[in-house]
Amino acid sequence: MKLSEIAEKLGCQLVGDGAVEILRVRGIDQATRGDLAFIANRKYLAHLKGTKASAVILGLEHPETPLPNLRSVNPYLTFAKAIELFYQAPLPPRGIDPTAVISPRAVIGKNPSVGAYVVIGDDVHIGDNVTLYPHVCIYTGVRMGNGCVVHAQTVLREFVQIGDRVIFQNGVIIGGDGFGFAKQDDDTLYKIVQSGTVIIEDDVEIGSHSTVDRATIGATVIKRGAKIDNLVQIGHGSTVGEHNLLAAQVGLAGSTVLESHVTLAGQVGCAGHLTIREHAVVTAQSGVGGNIDAHAIVSGSPTMDNLVWRKVIAGLPRLPDLLRRVRQLEVEIKAIKTHRTPDTVTDQKDEERNNA
Amino acid sequence: MKLSEIAEKLGCQLVGDGAVEILRVRGIDQATRGDLAFIANRKYLAHLKGTKASAVILGLEHPETPLPNLRSVNPYLTFAKAIELFYQAPLPPRGIDPTAVISPRAVIGKNPSVGAYVVIGDDVHIGDNVTLYPHVCIYTGVRMGNGCVVHAQTVLREFVQIGDRVIFQNGVIIGGDGFGFAKQDDDTLYKIVQSGTVIIEDDVEIGSHSTVDRATIGATVIKRGAKIDNLVQIGHGSTVGEHNLLAAQVGLAGSTVLESHVTLAGQVGCAGHLTIREHAVVTAQSGVGGNIDAHAIVSGSPTMDNLVWRKVIAGLPRLPDLLRRVRQLEVEIKAIKTHRTPDTVTDQKDEERNNA
Amino acid sequence: MKLSEIAEKLGCQLVGDGAVEILRVRGIDQATRGDLAFIANRKYLAHLKGTKASAVILGLEHPETPLPNLRSVNPYLTFAKAIELFYQAPLPPRGIDPTAVISPRAVIGKNPSVGAYVVIGDDVHIGDNVTLYPHVCIYTGVRMGNGCVVHAQTVLREFVQIGDRVIFQNGVIIGGDGFGFAKQDDDTLYKIVQSGTVIIEDDVEIGSHSTVDRATIGATVIKRGAKIDNLVQIGHGSTVGEHNLLAAQVGLAGSTVLESHVTLAGQVGCAGHLTIREHAVVTAQSGVGGNIDAHAIVSGSPTMDNLVWRKVIAGLPRLPDLLRRVRQLEVEIKAIKTHRTPDTVTDQKDEERNNA
């Protein structure tokens, strides 16, 4: 595809030779002839000089380059859209595979694609243009909107509600029983029936093997536009806010509330019964034990302000040395005091404890 | 349902108007007309005044209230049982779905519910009143007791043994190969055949996508009444004790032994070849590297006593300031020593290191 | 089986009575009559005296014992091979189950075992002697070599490439979409098509419920001989090196590069766009935020040298006491200065801050 054609399709300004032939999109450090590279982050500008790419997507503010280039307000988004010009995932055939087991009381909308060995329970309502890959299992009473894509092995448990254009990668479990038990007099555990449900709003995507538990009472909610990575656990009664980003292996205990535009990096854990306010960012492996303010960036387990945390972790390797230095100071002070005021009695017990 | 009827069914003392109509159970902070709320924790007593609930479950020791109420020794347990009066999960039909593939050498007890596309291998023995949801896969030689519920996509590998009334949520894997490799002379890894099995005792529940690996030799054991949340990893040869509670994303390396009534909070990791004694509690994200005493509460990675840990994490954000203060003290001491004893030679090298 | 026969089969030197009858292999601390125990680690030598084992596998350098024994350069490897003399996992029948749904455009090699309800898509090429357990789902265009074993519920997504003798435990997801989104002007997230693939080389093993995401562009690669445990997340565009060992619940963010013979212990997380060089070891629960040198052993979140980290964690519980001691030193220095130089003005502001 000619660069000029790409410029037109993506609505970018073309600078330089539009006749150059583009075969694919590639990172600037790996790009070769025929590649359209991109720079979304200023720190990659240094690669501009040495790159073998045939053309590059740049921000409006980036410097001039002899390389043919496309200018965009949001070069990362333009890169994302450029990929679509060169690749489309294979679409499964429309229609219902004869091996699918579908309850006569289920309703499926127009133009479905239902794969082999899909199971759909009683009273399920599914919208139009939905794709269900093989081995998807939908329990009784599920509601699903239009345009959803559900990959193989995903399970939607009884009564969960799914919006429009929701994407489930493989093996997602929506609506498994929440982890609720009441201690009995003999210290054994009594299972609390999880009578609530899960509500997943429009344009949500959930990664492979993530689990969203049904609420004890009421609903666990994943709000509009939230994106959840693989192997994430959403505890019963939690709310994931609009346009949240939850990276892989994050875990939310029960009744965690995330407001809109919250970002949780990989392996973050949240204790339950707390709120993380809008636009807050929690860095990787952090442990959230209390409420987090809007727009805060926090780190550590338990979390503290990210700037404080950076100083703390810079100081941590010096802790053993610090212990030695304080012991030295104590010795010196004692020497000074002894020397100057020979009548002073040092607190022997305290010293012993310090030496312990 | 009338409150008086609920009181009778749950064996509670009724205080106030028993004729009030109850439609469902709800948390005290969200409850409205028709709701039966509950208070299990004293700190929610403050909500009693403002609640719009029609009635409330209280402990015997809680104060009087004008609201109609049910008194219970264990209000949380009473709440759990109250839910059952208003909700029951839909039961799958009894019988064997014609699409199930069952070995002629398998034996299934009375009154089964076997869903679509279930696969049952040779020499499997299953007890009475068992429910297998769609896509469950049971390998050769598995033994399962009575009254088990196995949700969709769960896999029971060869020869594993399951007790009575065990509940598997979705996508549980019991008996996958343990992670065992022997290093060869050329530094490559030789797979060690995992010849052992998994034994799961009565009344265990295991959450979605948790994995319990088979032992290299002998058995990985999940003892009676243990409850395991989602995405938990139980390494080969480990023992999870009676009535343990393991929260989501916990990981046990091989040959970890948990005694009875142990609680591991979310994302806890345990190195292998260690024992956590009865009634110990490990708080969230902690890393257990050695044995833990009975009844201990431990935190941190690696773990320390929870009370010590609380002080440590309170002190951590002050570490950068502490480094500065110790440097200041060193300067001051040097000044005092120089001023008083001008013949003293300061250790220049030491100082440079401190400044590093 | 007689010990002499085992010695011959395993190519070990026999010391003592070769006629002793061996029924199975067992750990030295649990072994009883009829058991062949083993000692791979010097610290278990103490068990030699009290063991009831009938024989034992020892290293060449281990001391003499009256117990009949087999001598090996690598006793752990010999133990691994001894297990195979007593146990073999049941083999599923060869052939293609009539319930498998296989595209007429798929090609399957010689001597396959294809289980019930397996689904194989268009243009899939599978080599010889492959075993696919029930409910395996293979999307369009997948390539797989010879001798692979794929356990139930595993999913291979479109176009992924699998080498020879690869083993997938249950519910492995290869080639799910990477977690890539571009922020739009209104702060919502635009899905970036994941146009790349996953390449898994020969002799790799991947544990239950692990997920390996497809690259945005190019490929996520798992190199020859790497072994990955359960519930591991491999982000898009990452490379896992030859003969790596990744323990359970490890997570790699996008574009992480692991060179050969790297070991990541349980629950380790790696930020993306970094390299861990050959033979490095990262201990459990650590968080890797930058490049790691070859042969390094690192710990902590973020990581530091393991020897430093050991001192840091030994010092951490003393931090609260350290804070108290430094405060005490400040008081004493102030007293000395005041006493000696009454004209000195202490910095009041600084002190207030210290007290804060």
Image: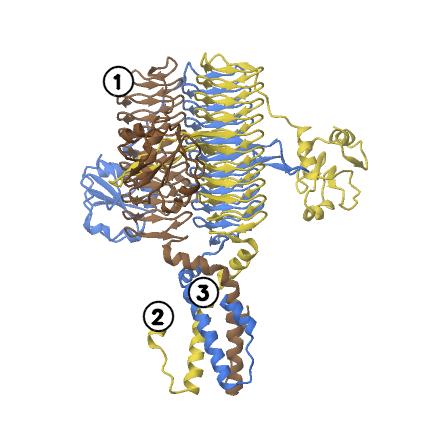
Chain colours: A blue, B yellow, C brown
Are discs 2 and 1 less than 8 Å apart at CB? Answer: no
A267 left or right of B2?
left
Chain-order first, disc 2 or disc 3:
3
- What kind of element bears circle 1? loop
Asked if B64 appears above or below C347 in the picture, the reply is: above
Are discs 2 and 3 less than 8 Å apart at CB? Answer: no
- Residue indicated by mark 2: B353
Near-viewer residue (A272 or B263): B263
Nearest to the eye among marks 3 and 1: give it.
1
Q: Position of residue C27 (x, y in %)?
A: 41, 37
Amino acid identity at mark 1: Lys
Which picture quadrant has residue B76? top right
Number of numbered discs overlaid on the protein picture: 3
- Residue indicated by mark 1: C110
Near-viewer residue (B82 or A190): A190
Say which chain tag 3 marks: B
Near-viewer residue (C13 or A22): C13
B170 left or right of A185?
left
Badge 3: how crowded within 10 Å, few (<14), some, or many (20+)? some
- Residue indicated by mark 3: B320
Say which chain tag 2 marks: B
Q: Where is residue B6 in the image (x, y as percent from the top left)?
A: 75, 30
